[in-house]
Image (cartoon, rainbow, N blue to C red):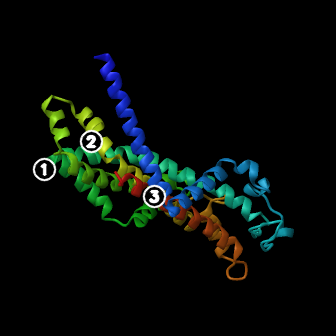
Amino acid sequence: MVEKDGILWKLLGREHKEIYRRRWYKFKSNPLSVLGLGIVATVVFSAILAPYIIPYPESVGLYMNFTEAFQPPSLKHPFGTDSYGRDIFSRTIYGFRYSLLLATVVLSIVVVPGTILGMIAGYYRDTKIETAIMRLTDIFLGVPPLILALAIASVLSPNLINSMFAITLMWWPWYTRLAYSSTSAVVNEPFVKAAQLIGAGLKHILFNEIAPNIMSSILTKVTLDVGWVILIGASLSFLGLGAQPPTPDLGTMVAEGAKYLPYYWWPTIFPAMAIVYIILGFNLLGDGIRDALSSD
């Protein structure tokens, strides 16, 4: 019996490896997916290694050198300098850190509770539990995300932590709605009914039966949402409700540089292009992951 179980587990292991191999082949066959992966990799590694690769570390903090203010892009300063003589390239690379930190913290907080609430509502269809959870979700979804984030951030002290808090409060309903729809589609499947018939508890059914079957859609949304969270965070910073100077936040840099348009365009254009670069990378990666996971 033990030997048969061992053979069975080997066969299951081979089957899972084959599934992953097919998914990876599907992913790498799409040039845009590979491009997205490459962009995300450069952003992540640049953020991690920023203190060691930026040419002017002093430009990240409180630093002023008015003799080099508004230097145009050159070999010495690839992105030029700002009104304080700080190297924009160094600040942009360091800005990747704050953008990824914002997205990581927000999504780490909202994904788990939002998904669990959605699974509970989807499991208890047509009950007061579903009504309570989904009506609360609808209230939050009824307000445009940026407007809700602005309303929350405006009553708090403007800084990076409070901008994270504002975005977190308005982002969880999207995962609740997605998990609710996905759970509703599988809750009547035979494997869920079988688990109920043998007396499995709610925890087992949600996390062992339902969760594995909806994780692909959740994972895809997480990847796609990184870019949107960064965009919302940059919008708050642009309006003065996010990270404050001299923090090298990309949205703050765009806002500061916009004062000097059109004569000095580089303090605004390069940080804005960096935001677009990040969003493009994660969107392409998310599309590739979605296509790969939907191929089975």
Q: Which mark is residue 177?
A: none
Q: CA distance from mark 1 to mark 2?
A: 18 Å
Q: Is residue 252 left or right of residue 225?
A: right
Viewer-proximal residue among 88 and 159: 88
Taking the spot 41% from the left edge, 67% from the top edge, the residue there is 147
Taking the spot 31% from the left edge, 17% from the top edge, the residue there is 2
Kind of residue at disc 2: Ile
Viewer-proximal residue among 103 and 78: 78
Q: Quadrant of residue 88?
A: bottom right
Kind of residue at disc 3: Gly
Q: Is residue 34 left or right of residue 53?
A: left
Local packing at callout 2 (Cα closer than 10 Å; few below 14, some 14-19, many 20+) is many
- Residue at image mark 2: 210
Q: Is residue 92 visible?
A: yes
- Residue at image mark 3: 288
Q: Is residue 36 above or below residue 69?
A: above
- Residue at image mark 1: 126
Where disc 2 sits, the SS reads: helix
Question: Residue 239: horizontal and vertical position, in percent?
Answer: 55, 68
Q: CA distance from mark 3 to mark 1?
A: 35 Å
Q: CA distance from mark 3 to mark 2?
A: 24 Å
Lower position in the chain sequence, tag 3 or tag 1: 1
Lower position in the chain sequence, tag 1 or tag 2: 1
Local packing at callout 3 (Cα closer than 10 Å; few below 14, some 14-19, many 20+) is many
Q: Is residue 166 visible?
A: no
Question: Residue 174: horizontal and vertical position, in percent?
Answer: 34, 56
Task: Look at discs 3 and 1 and give the one toward the viewer.
Answer: 3
Where disc 3 sits, the SS reads: helix
Verify CB contact (< 8 Å) between mark 3 and mark 1. Answer: no
Residue with the most extreme right position: 67
